[in-house]
């Protein structure tokens, strides 16, 4: 009888050279960045589709309870996290009083919100809410300069009698220390309403030239920020610039995003929504705008 004996082979795991390991990590980081860019393009396509189907409402939202044409916000409860000239810094405030006529005038409500400093350290991406009463609020969103120049926020809606609010609120810092802000409201003109398709045409693309990632795509709270990304229409002609702020949510499955298109026409479109931390398309809603 013939007996066969099998010799076992012991496989030894080879250690990857340090240089190759570093190159693998760099390749993986580049791949993740590419995925993020492609993800944003998919989300932008989805947003363009939504924009074509929607015509912004231009009714006077303040007929039932007119809001003050101007008010002062007294900056008594604010903080800055990260410094005033550091990309990704956060400026937040809670229940700053709103007063009519002067910083000592009659109180009409309270202001709460936050701003994130975008790449280039020239602009803050902001969102906020004015609480006029327990049921009546006004929401805002937009860019604010990182200096004492006047900024503008789009009124994106509200609750109670302000549920269909629209228009623009201009913000002027009172002094270099920004102890207070002058808020000036300008209602939208229903006769000047236009469709989003009138503004952006049949298609829209965004070139990622002003983006910066703080953190990574696997850590809750990481940020994807951009300022001055170029918007082009279907013919390739530039029509404006894009600014925005995305924050990675718990579970690291999706980003919560807000942004603004500053169009060359002078019109502004604001949007908000979530974008998956993957190649899947996201859902972004147009929240308001200024101009037509």
Image: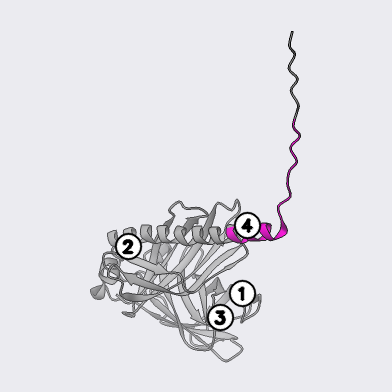
Counting residues from the start of the chain, the first of labels 2 and 3 encountered is: 2
Q: Which mark is residue 51?
A: 2
Q: Are marks 1 and 3 in contact (CB under 8 Å)?
A: no
Picture quarter containing residue 167?
bottom left
Q: Which residue is mark 3?
A: 121
Counting residues from the start of the chain, the first of labels 4 and 2 encountered is: 4
Q: Percent from the top left, x then y, of residue 151?
A: 46, 83
Q: CA distance from mark 2 to mark 3?
A: 29 Å
Counting residues from the start of the chain, the first of labels 1 and 3 encountered is: 1
Q: Which residue is mark 4?
A: 24
Q: Percent from the top left, x then y, of residue 265?
A: 31, 79
Q: Is residue 25 magenta?
A: yes
Q: CA distance from mark 4 to mark 3?
A: 32 Å
Counting residues from the start of the chain, the first of labels 1 and 2 encountered is: 2
At a point 75% along the width and 13% down the height, the residue shown is 3
* Nearer to us: label 4 or label 1: 4
* Nearer to us: label 1 or label 3: 3
Of residues 131 and 23, the one drawn nearer to the viewer in this rendering = 23
Q: Are marks 1 and 2 in contact (CB under 8 Å)?
A: no
Write the start and end of the magenta stretch as one range: 9-27
């Amino acid at each position: 009888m013939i007996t066969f004996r099998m010799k076992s082979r012991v496989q030894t795991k080879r250690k990857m050279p340090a240089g190759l390991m570093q190159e693998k990590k760099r390749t993986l980081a580049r791949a993740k960045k590419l995925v993020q860019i492609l993800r944003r393009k998919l989300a932008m396509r989805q947003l363009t589709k939504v924009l074509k189907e929607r015509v912004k409402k231009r009714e006077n939202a303040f007929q039932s309870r007119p809001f003050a044409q101007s008010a002062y916000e007294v900056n008594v409860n604010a903080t800055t996290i990260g410094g005033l000239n550091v990309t990704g810094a956060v400026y937040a405030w809670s229940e700053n009083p709103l007063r009519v006529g002067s910083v000592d005038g009659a109180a009409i409500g309270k202001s709460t919100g936050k701003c994130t400093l975008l790449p280039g350290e020239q602009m803050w991406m902001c969102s906020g809410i004015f609480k006029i009463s327990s049921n009546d609020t006004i929401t805002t969103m937009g860019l604010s300069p990182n200096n004492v120049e006047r900024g503008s926020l789009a009124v994106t809606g509200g609750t109670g009698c302000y549920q269909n609010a629209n228009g623009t609120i201009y913000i002027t810092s009172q002094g270099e220390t920004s102890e207070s802000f002058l808020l000036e409201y300008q209602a939208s003109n229903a006769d000047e309403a236009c469709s989003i398709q009138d503004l952006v045409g049949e298609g829209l693309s965004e070139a990622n030239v002003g983006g910066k990632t703080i953190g990574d795509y696997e850590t809750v709270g990481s940020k994807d920020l951009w300022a001055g990304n170029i918007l082009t229409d279907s013919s390739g002609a530039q029509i404006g610039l894009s600014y925005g702020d995305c924050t990675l949510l718990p579970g690291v499955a999706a980003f919560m995003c807000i942004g603004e298109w500053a169009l060359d026409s002078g019109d502004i479109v604001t949007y908000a929504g979530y974008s998956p931390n993957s190649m899947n398309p996201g859902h972004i809603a147009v929240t308001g705008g200024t101009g037509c």
